[in-house]
Image (cartoon, rainbow, N blue to C red):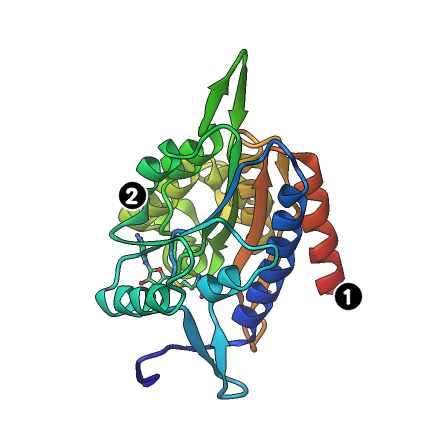
Amino acid sequence: MPFGDLSKVGPWTRKKLELLNKYLSAYTTILAAQPWCSGVHYIDAFAGPGMHIDRETQQLLEGSPLRALNVEPSFDRLIFIEKDDDRVERLNALADEYAERNIDVWQGDCNDVLPHIFEEIPGNQRAFLLLDPYNLGVRWETIQAAAEAGKQRGNRFYKTIEIMINFSLHDANRNVVRSQPDDMDPHQAQRLTEVWGSQEWMDWIYGEAPQLSFSGPEQVKVDDVPDRLSEGFKARLETVYDHVSDYVIMRNTTNAPQYSLILASHVGVAQKIMNDIMEYAEQ
Ligand SMILES: C[S@@+](CC[C@H](N)C(=O)[O-])C[C@H]1O[C@@H](n2cnc3c(N)ncnc32)[C@H](O)[C@@H]1O
């Protein structure tokens, strides 16, 4: 297929993909060593075209589906979900190229598709779910369904899915957050509420102004919105996952925050590995 329609991506995408690569290798290595684990799945909910063009080098850059396909030890099954027609076509071509692998390509809104996929994963298998939207495109119900997904075996319930999520600071900053809560567009505010699953995000980014106005205390935006939103979202993930990593804020070349990358898991070792990978990347 020609490459003309591929999107050009900045260094922050390359950094995200490198972190993803490192974590996926650790994930499949650990699970391959567990005798009880009979299958490891990779679910890419916002899969993209599989390939990008690196804006800095003008070279092709493998996207998340290709990274997952090439991880060793390999995933037993890969599920790519994508909304866009052309990108689905590319993903189908990728699946043909890797015909010996167990790959499913689904077209649609991942928030609708994912609950069906979660259902299929047995209690003695595990799945890694990448939620990598351009914007505030993940619904809290989807995150909650992933966190709760699992199967009863004997007298124990085994939770099966961990997530890596990109929380779009760019979308929140540009379209939702305003100097004062009353200045926000209610429709835009609702988009953030849908990702968060509540309006509590407002408590993280608005506080009382130091000086009282004549009409009483005023709510104003805090200075460090990207950090506050990232901390708040991490705390929100901790309501459904026991082990949530630190966050890394990805910035563009003018240092503007693009998104926060966070891992949420049911096991402590996952959190530790991700924190180590993030710490190393920040050095
Ligand atoms: C940031 S890109 C994904 C990049 C990819 N994860 C990578 O690293 O190579 C987001 C993709 O999600 C797709 N998308 C947007 N909304 C979606 C939705 N609700 N469900 C599934 N895909 C969606 C877009 O068409 C776009 O290709």
Residue 258 visible in the displayed image: no
Which numbered circle lies on residue 283?
1
Q: Image quadrant for the C terminus?
A: bottom right
Q: Between residue 69 and residue 170, name the one nearer to us.
A: 69
Q: What x and y, as percent, mark residue 146?
A: 44, 35
> Which residue corresponds to mark 2?
113
Residue 167 visible in the displayed image: yes
Q: Between residue 258 and residue 186, name the one nearer to us.
A: 258
Q: Residues within 10 Å of mark 1 (few under 14, many from 20)?
A: few
Q: Is residue 38 above or below residue 5?
A: above
Write the residue at 52% across / 51% down.
75
Instruction: Confirm if mark 2 falls within 8 A of ligand 1.
Output: yes
> What's the distance in space between the residues labelled 1 and 2, CA to CA?
38 Å
Write the residue at 31% across / 36% down.
116
Q: Image quadrant for the N terminus?
A: bottom left
Q: What x and y, as percent, mark residue 246?
A: 66, 47
Q: Is residue 49 above or below residue 259?
A: below
Q: What x and y, as percent, mark residue 140?
A: 40, 38
Write the residue at 68% across / 42% down.
33
